[in-house]
Amino acid sequence: MRRSLTASACLLALALVGACGSGEETPDTPARTGAVTNTAAPADSDTDSDTGTDTETGGVVLDVRIADGVVQPTNIRLDAAVGEPIVLRVTSDAVDELHVHSVPEHTFPVEATGEVGADPGVVQEFEFVVDVPGQTAVELHDAGVTVATLLVRP
């Protein structure tokens, strides 16, 4: 009986881990959500740093750069609050997809707006909120990289 439960738990864990790697959209796959804006790369920023608080809105801002196969930042931790606007500002020379594993889940298409070996180009902005406190992973699907973990408090 114990061996059967262990095997079942292992199979369930494998199914959950493989869910993010599926190339097909199914009815359970979250739709692309949130605001998407393409803007020219800013000369200066209204944030305290590349990853921090927006001084105008008070929301969380995370600048992500994908250039020549390198993702910056990776595995950082940010604090946020339930219902607080979170903005991902992405420049990329490669097509990818951002997954935000939260409630609700969000998926954003990242376009290649620059050329490999050159400036990654136009800034793509994706805005969302998280409705449930806890840890929220922000991942680049094709690159297989966790960009950030948001610690969302009530």
Image: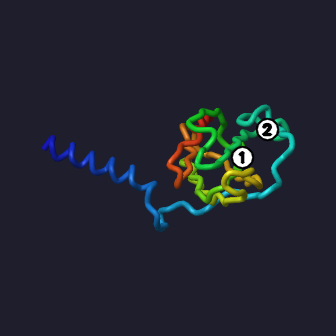
Question: Which residue is drawn at the image coordinates 54% and 38% (left, top)?
Answer: 135
Q: Secondary structure at mark 2?
A: loop
Q: Secondary structure at mark 1?
A: strand
Residue 128, percent across and down?
68, 50
Q: Which residue is mark 1?
A: 87
Question: Which residue is drawn at the image coordinates 62% and 45% (left, top)?
Answer: 130
In the rendered structure, which disc, 2 or 1, sits on the residue that comes first in sequence?
A: 2
Question: Which residue is drawn at the image coordinates 66% and 36% (left, top)?
Answer: 80
Dot 2 alpha-carbon crowd within 10 angstroms: few under 14, some 14 to 19, many 20 or more:
many
Q: Are marks 2 and 1 in contact (CB under 8 Å)?
A: yes
User: Which quadrant does the C terminus fall into?
Assistant: top right
Please state which amino acid type lies under the numbered disc 1. Answer: Val
Res. 39 image quadrant: bottom right
Res. 2 image quadrant: top left
Residue 93 seen: yes
Task: Say if 137 sits above or below 15 in the image.
Answer: above
Task: Say if 141 sits above or below 45 in the image.
Answer: below
Please state which of residues 143 and 151 is positioned toward the viewer in this rendering: 143
Q: CA distance from mark 2 to mark 1?
A: 9 Å
Task: Say if 24 sits above or below 56 in the image.
Answer: below
Disc count in the image? 2
Question: Which residue is drawn at the image coordinates 71% and 42% (left, top)?
Answer: 63
Please state which of residues 115 and 46 is positioned toward the viewer in this rendering: 115
Q: Which residue is mark 2?
A: 54
Residue 72, percent across and down?
63, 40
Please state which amino acid type lies under the numbered disc 2. Answer: Asp
